[in-house]
Amino acid sequence: MSKIEAYNILLKFIKSRNKGQKKLDVVLIWISLLFWTGRYNKALDYVDNYLKNRCCEELYFWKGVLYYFLKDYFKASEVLERAEAIDAKSAEIKYFLAETYILRAEIEKAESKYRAMIIDKELNGLGLYGTGCCLMKKDRVDEALGFFNRALECAKQDYKIHILNKKGLCLLAQEKLEDAYACFQECLKISPGDDSIKLNMALVLSKLGNYEKAVEIYKSFLSKNPYDLTAINNLGLCLAALGNYREALEYCNKGLEIDPINIDLLGNKGYCHYKLQDYKNALDCLNEAEKYSKDDIILLNNKALCLMALENYDDALKLFDRVLQEHSSDDVLINKAHCLIKKELFQEALKCLDKVKNKIEKGFDVYVLQGICFEKLGNNEKAIEYYNKSLNA
């Protein structure tokens, strides 16, 4: 929350409770001046001095806001709760309480305050938006999207970008990629230079397979923010998807200079080495990553592929089985079947391939491997049948 946003909410609260107390008005003006000059502790001393003689919600409200900007969220919520006890109907106090609860990761408390604001004619948009944000944090994306759509109907122009951005993230979580892209485009019309929106757009573009455009955005962002590890990692992934493994490695190494134990970067570096057929270095990277993430199934699958490439089939099979115990995956089943074929265990490979669920999508790989198994087992009729199936997959 910016100081301008905070002050506008405060001003609304104070104006609605104008009691004509001239002395108190002077006090509030002086606190405002200290607030705008960033002298929060001085303002707190001033508030405390007047609270000795006058207990009122305006001063408690100010005190809570000052603690908020001092980032002492525990004291902020404590003081704002006192203000709410004096004025239980205030939507403004509820808003600041909700914002404070969010920063303390008390999502249920925050949501209850945001929901209570929805009946306020002027702050209902903030209440709807805040409720949506809480629901997003609870992975209730469908419900969150409904609140963001309602918030857009009553939002002021300068706040629409926040709502549209969250709406785009909801659509992204729902895999509605085209809709998410359109949402982020609308955001950029309002704020063309917003880097956070551009990064969200790059993420959507990468999921849509438009890696070239995503790479442009990530490179532009990193020219101004060279130490952003998420952008470095995502750029590396996009470059790898384009087959630019050596350039992807360069970015992985840049990221690892900043954070030598970054699991994602180590995993991606290992993948790039694997694709460049540098299996030993790939395995070294993946072993290093495994020290910090022992149960990452993607990491373990890639490590098994390296072992298989190095003809260490027994250890590769152990890893494939370990991954499959945690999560049944068609890709891992196909990898395991390939490894079993390398060991000439053709019947076991066929049993493994029978477990692949999505044969429509994975048909070509499955049918080719089944054809190889039947051919090696001397069943040429079956082999021809499955090779033909692979041609039509």
Image (cartoon, rainbow, N blue to C red):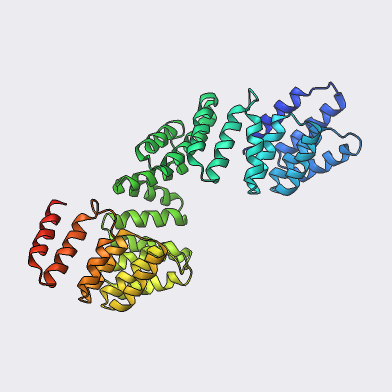
- The spot of residue 362 in percent (x, y) is 24, 55
Q: Quadrant of residue 51?
A: top right
Q: Quadrant of residue 349?
A: bottom left
Seen in the image, is 307 located left or right of residue 389? right
- The spot of residue 293 in percent (x, y) is 47, 67
Looking at the image, can residue 190 be seen? yes
Residue that appears at 37% across and 39% down: 176
Q: Quadrant of residue 7?
A: top right
Above-or-below relation of 343 to 105: below
Q: In this orientation, which residue lies closer to the viewer: 352 or 137? A: 352
Looking at the image, can residue 253 be seen? no
Seen in the image, is 242 located left or right of residue 5? left
Q: Quarter of the image for the N terminus: give it.
A: top right
The residue lying furthest to the top in this view is 20
Residue that appears at 10% across and 56% down: 388
Q: In this orientation, which residue lies closer to the viewer: 57 or 197? A: 57
